[in-house]
Amino acid sequence: MTVPSSTYRLQLRPEFTFADAAELVDYLRALGAGALYASPVLDATPGSTHGYDVVDPTLARPELGGEDARKVLSARLADAGLGFVVDIVPNHMSVEVPKANHWWWDVLRHGAESAYAGYYDIDWGRGRILLPVLGEDADVAELTVEGDELVYYDHRFPLAPGTSGGSPQEVHARQHYELIGWRRGNTELTYRRFFDIVNLAAVSVEKRDVFEATHGEVLRWVAEGDVTGLRVDHPDGLADPGGYLRLLRAGAPDAWLVVEKILHPGEDLPQTWPVDGTTGYDTLREVAGVLIDPAGEAGFTELAAKLGVRTDYHAVEEEARRLVTDGILVAEVRRIAALLSDVDTESARAAVAEVMIAFPVYRSYLPEGGANWAAALGRASASRPDLGAALDALDSQVRGEPEGELATRIQQTSGMVVAKGTEDTTFYRFTRFAAVNEVGGNPDRFGLGVGEFHALATAREAGSPATMTTLTTHDTKRSEDVRARMAVLSELPGEFGEAVGRWTSARGIDEPSLNLLAWQTLVGAWPITPERLRDYLDKAAKESKLRTTWTDHDEEFEKAVAAWPSQVLGDGELAADVAAFVERVRGPGWSNALSQKLLQLTAPGVPDVYQGTELWDLSLVDPDNRREVDYGVRRAILDRVVAGELPAVDESGAAKLLLVHKALSLRRERPELFRGYRPLHAEGLAADHALVYTRAADLVVVATRLPVGLAAAGGWRDTVLPLPEGTWTDVLTGRPTGDRPALAELLDRYPVALLVRE
């Protein structure tokens, strides 16, 4: 099996193509990476900046350079000894531009008689395919006919054979599809979609012929040795994730295979899945959590309550999920409820919604995950005892036919409810301490103990040593370095609370959750332009759905939010106060950033470095995290580091690049050092501030935690680190040390050390 020593994620797009990636291969090799990990590379919606909207899975994307350029990139990676990991999207395809997707175009033209009618999850029993593309008034008077196409402004649709005569409205009435007002999409859609995005139609990849049609090209690349690993996007949306992954493994028996499965704390991957692990959000939660001071929880809870931000997490989450079942995903809930036998329509709908709201994890995989299904039923029954009969009927039918359509649809939809209700709504409402509001996170859990961190790392080494680990992705709510600086606030709840009180009095936002999130974000991402902060807050306000949404706008509120960044940054006294506070936490934030990076790069698993994050990266949620990366700057710093420079920990971020280079290079050159896992401990007054472990007998990792408290107590003082006998060298600095180093000396230049015994 081709397990890389590490990966480096690149976001390919028309402005950054296969050829541009090929030009970076020498840099990635010099940095120490083991494989290039690319965003989706199959043909996508014209102009797509991310590639998750595939329109033709049989073709390397022409806008990236096409097949020839893909082969050049693959060859260059192979020559450099690097792997090539590709992101694939089995759950859905884009139908935003129907003509770009020839399978969808054929379905619209021929309806249920199309050769591709079974490729998409369409409810043919409800008549014509509903396409919610018309305006607010759903006026078909604007339709025109041009040749064999029906046209609505810039939208074009095919005409069924022999239906071109008469007025455009008459022609429209004879098609296999019906154009409807866009607002009807959430309630009446007749095809399954990706979350609430009507332009992404779900694919029936559980069918063998559909699997072969959608995966043949990528699996050819694997068979020919061009691709060495696959990352599977959103497996929870599939009808049968386990069955799909078994097909994929059969087609790529030697490939490294990881899945974007979001695990709840304490949840494991289904043991029947033939994969190497997840994409690492579980590790992100653990690494970020161990750097948070749990003693700060009470102070942040008090601050949130004082500002009017709700602190009852589970109630907020339940309300947000109910908003999804009762509004955003009404069409999906109705389709599932119609499958429940011998229950009246409203009770069936309510029971289905209640169970999905109550899921403790994203979904179950019956017959696997039966405990999670039972927990959801139990919670639903406690919440709605009046639905007892309907819930009993639902439970009986689902358990009786775990592979039936009802069980399949409720399980694959529960993940949508959790993702939209929790990640995309609750995380923007429950803003008590935003550093833990992360994909795979648990906002009601404030930090992680060192003992638990060690236990989880030990379990990962034993159970999934080849899983991916990560700190930043294209989907994270904020970058790792923003999160690291925000973690410092957990050590300063009183100071931060007082500061937020002053700032809110001067220029607060008239919505408590957004107001508290805005100040945390400003401190975490400083310095930031008004434009970037404006775009972030606009998205946060709409995702929270408290005062405005993506579809129902409060124009005055949105204008006020848009004006806020310039007002704050343009207020000399206020901006100076914020800058002074940032200066207070910037140094400890750098310490946290270096510590978490070393933990991620050396702990069990295959670490991924998201593009550009080898230097400080203060990006926020997408699309902010897909901005262009300046590789000229990074090449220059890497050259100096390779030449022997030991950069200071400063605003350049060069110290982080040094750490990334040294750790990745050691992983690639000496993989035998990164096996096993055993906790170690320091001794002395500040021992609790050192997180230490050994992998193999000859490798020891040392990281600093809670740096503000450490400094306040007088530093490391008498703290020492007992090591096995021998001469040890810090790979980061090149300095030798004995087997009982004083941490004040070992960590005098950097807050971390990577020790190898000679």
Image (cartoon, grey):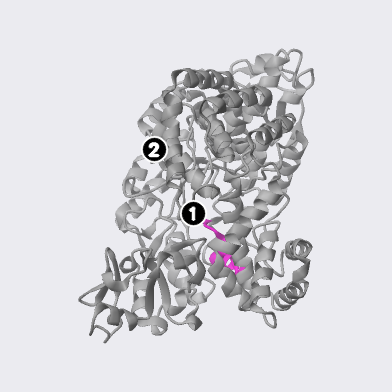
Q: Nearer the viewer, residue 180 or 365?
A: 180
650 w.r.t. 281: above or below: above
155 w.r.t. 705: above or below: below
Amino acid identity at mark 1: Thr
Q: Residues within 10 Å of mark 1 (few under 14, many from 20)?
A: many
In the picture as drawn, the residue positioned furthest to the bottom comes out as: 162
Q: For this view, does 716 lie left or right of residue 40? A: right
741 w.r.t. 216: above or below: above
Amino acid identity at mark 2: Asp
Q: Which numbered marker is on residue 26?
A: 2
Q: For this view, does 455 lie left or right of residue 88? A: right
Q: For this view, does 238 lie left or right of residue 53? A: right
* Residue drawn at point x = 63 percent, y = 34 percent: 307
Which residue range is magenta in the image?
229-248
The quarter of the image holding the N terminus is bottom right
Q: Position of residue 678 (x, y in %)?
A: 75, 36
Q: Residues within 10 Å of mark 2 (few under 14, many from 20)?
A: few
Q: Quadrant of residue 590?
A: top right
Of helix, strand and loop, which one carries label 1? loop
Q: Is residue 611 visible?
A: no
Q: Position of residue 183 (x, y in %)?
A: 44, 64
Q: Nearer the viewer, residue 411 or 553?
A: 553
Question: How far apart are the alpha carbons under marks 1 and 2?
Answer: 18 Å
Which residue is identified by label 1? Answer: 228
